[in-house]
Amino acid sequence: MQIINIVEQYPDVNITVKAGELKEWAEYIVRLTHQELEQQVANVKNEIYINRNEVAKMLGVDKSTLWRWGKQNYLVPIEVGGKRMYKMNDVKQILGEGRHGSN
């Protein structure tokens, strides 16, 4: 939308907008946000989670390395039912980078 470009380029400018146009813009933002949220939900539903023992074995590292990587935001676990689980896609990304293996 053009109004977004104006706001980004001139954040201090005053804009006069018709109520109908403001409503259209608000509806556009709501639709865009709704689409993004639907995509995020779909991604979560399709995600596979694995436990830290499996991750450590796949990456050839110790569990203490996984703990350290979590603190460094390199490979962050998700708490599921009191257990640390990891996204398979995150593990695959590390495997693809070839930066694993050091404790």
Image (cartoon, grey):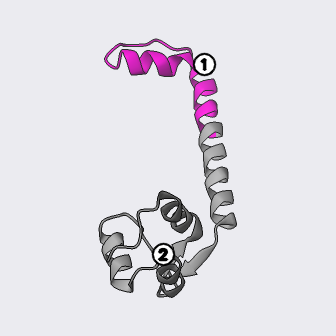
User: Which badge, 1 or 2, comes first in the chain's sequence?
Assistant: 1
Residue ID for mark 2: 59
Residue 41 lies, in percent from the top left, at 64, 59
Please tell me whether residue 35 is drawn above or below residue 29 in the rendered image.
Answer: below
Left or right of residue 26, residue 45 in this image: right
Q: Which of these two is toward me, 64 or 95?
A: 95
Q: Residue at x 45, y 15 (%)?
A: 6
Please tell me whether residue 27 is drawn above or below residue 45 in the rendered image.
Answer: above
Q: Which of these two is toward me, 12 or 52?
A: 52
User: Three-letter amino acid code at disc 1?
Assistant: Glu
- As measured in the structure, the alpha-carbon distance from the residue carrying label 1 to the one carrying label 2 is 54 Å
Q: Residue at x 47, y 88 (%)?
A: 82
Please tell me whether residue 3 is drawn above or below residue 41 in the rendered image.
Answer: above
User: Can residue 53 be found in the magenta stretch?
Assistant: no
Mark 1, secondary structure of its residue = helix
The stretch of residues the image draws in magenta is 1-30
Residue ID for mark 1: 21
Q: What main secondary structure does the magenta stretch of the protein show?
A: helix
User: Three-letter amino acid code at disc 2?
Assistant: Leu
Q: Which quarter of the rendered picture does the C terminus lie within?
A: bottom left
Left or right of residue 64, residue 46 in this image: right
Residue 73 lies, in percent from the top left, at 35, 64
Q: Residue at x 58, y 64 (%)?
A: 89
Residue 64 in which image quadrant: bottom left
